[in-house]
Amino acid sequence: MPGLRKTSQDWSLNNFLSITLQQHGSVYWKKGSAEILKNASSELPLHHTLKDCFSVGNSPIWMDSSTASQCSSLEKAVGGAQHLANITGSRAYERFTGNQIAKIYSQNPEVYMQTERISLVSSFAASLFLGAYAPIDYSDGSGMNLLKICEKVWSASCLDACAPALAEKLGCPVPSHSVLGPISPYYIKHYGFSPDCKIVAFTGDNPASLAGMRLQEGDIAISLGTSDTLFLWIQEPTPALEGHILCNPVDSQAYMALLCFKNGSLMRERIRDDCASGSWDEFSKALTSTVAGNNGNLGFYFDVMEITPEAVGIHRFNRDNQKVSDFPKEVEIRALIEGQFMAKRIHAEKLGYKVMPRTRILATGGASHNKKILQVLSDVFNAPVYTIDTANSACLGSAYRAIHGLVAETGVSLADVVKLAPEPRLAVTPTTGVEELYRPLLKRYAELEQKVIYNPTSSCLAK
């Protein structure tokens, strides 16, 4: 980045470079900026040279939620939310770049007309290292509501719904493993990079995390944190109104999916406090004192409005699908954990995910240290659970992708490139016979979820 310091770091050893940055942010280059970038003087800090190159001073980022009207217009223009998801992998989201561009065009058309190039944050950073406008990669580009994820080209109908002549300002997208070219002379002279250093397409943090966790076909990575997040490797996606389908960052013929569940560890901690005196040991003992399947008792636990599905409240059902106001403490604990993991499997399969004989679940986050919780996860998915240390998975994934860039065009997979990296640690395996137990429960849970979403009066709200 332009802020790299002149320290003892020997940048001359870098032969291939790739970096990850937050998804959904966008940068707007003013007309004439390409020449300024190309001819940047190594005697000046890069931010000084580029200070007047941007038509939008404050770039919109993923936290922006001010584009609801643009989202509605985009979905209407292409035939509805599901049709948009079929094209781009997601229904319209406020933070997605196409809707941010549409807002800028509608509110400041003169600023839009002054814009020569629109970059994602990832391709913006790559542009700095190239000394030229870098293309957007498939994977990060599929978080814009603009890319046809199957054909890997911009959707004309989506572009037209957002702003005129948008394809020219975006440039053509490229495979995520693409070698974009040699590093800019600025970085050779200013920081001592090798003239032989090549730039591999930069991408977003979520795609880079998939690379860092070394997911393969059929694998799931699950982060059990404040919110629970699923990363999925999918071959044949079926986009839905919940979750996101993105182009896979390490295999252009495959896809990745993202699902976020807001009621994660905070919900687990609240039930631990209510039912296990605030003790994880007591929580685990209660969990193991009940049988898999919880004798047919199912629960939905949403202290705050959930993302997947869009619902709120505490909803409990007995084995006869009758709403009940409470469960015994140990039943409550298992209903919470089984319900959270059944929801994850149900919504993953809605997006086209299939549990395979070689499926691995890679778990990280606070709850991944609790083997009793992981056992339920393993049983619900009928797959072994491994634990991984992914404190910097996105950064690690960028390093893996840079190495992969050396050989990607020859058909060598990322898995082959990083096969000597440390393997995840096996934590638990599924209990014999659980697949037959959970199959009807998963069906029941999916049916009851629809009641929870569309019949909120059936809720027993948390006190």
Image (cartoon, rainbow, N blue to C red):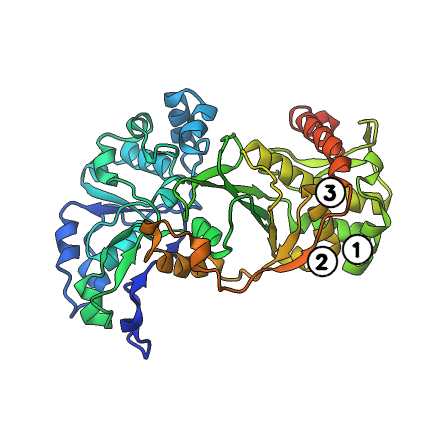
| Mark 3 in CB contact with mark 2 (< 8 angstroms) | no
Residue 391 spot, x, y in % from top left: 53, 62
Residue 41 spot, x, y in % from top left: 14, 65
Quadrant location, the C terminus: top right
Q: What residue is disc 2 on?
A: 370
Identify the element where label 2 is drawn.
loop
- Going by the numbered disc 2, the residue's amino acid type is Asn
Q: CA distance from mark 3 to mark 2?
A: 14 Å
The structure residue drawn at horizontal position 38% and vertical position 27%, both measured from the top left corner, is: 74
- Going by the numbered disc 3, the residue's amino acid type is Glu
| Residue 396 as seen in the image, left or right of residue 40 | right
Q: Quadrant of residue 149?
A: top left
Q: What residue is disc 1 on?
A: 284
Q: What residue is disc 3 on?
A: 338
| Residue 450 as seen in the image, left or right of residue 46 | right
| Mark 2 in CB contact with mark 1 (< 8 angstroms) | yes
Q: Quadrant of residue 456?
A: top right
User: Is residue 135 depicted above or below 371 in this figure?
Assistant: above
* Label placed on residue 63: none
The structure residue drawn at horizontal position 68% and vertical position 30%, both measured from the top left corner, is: 446
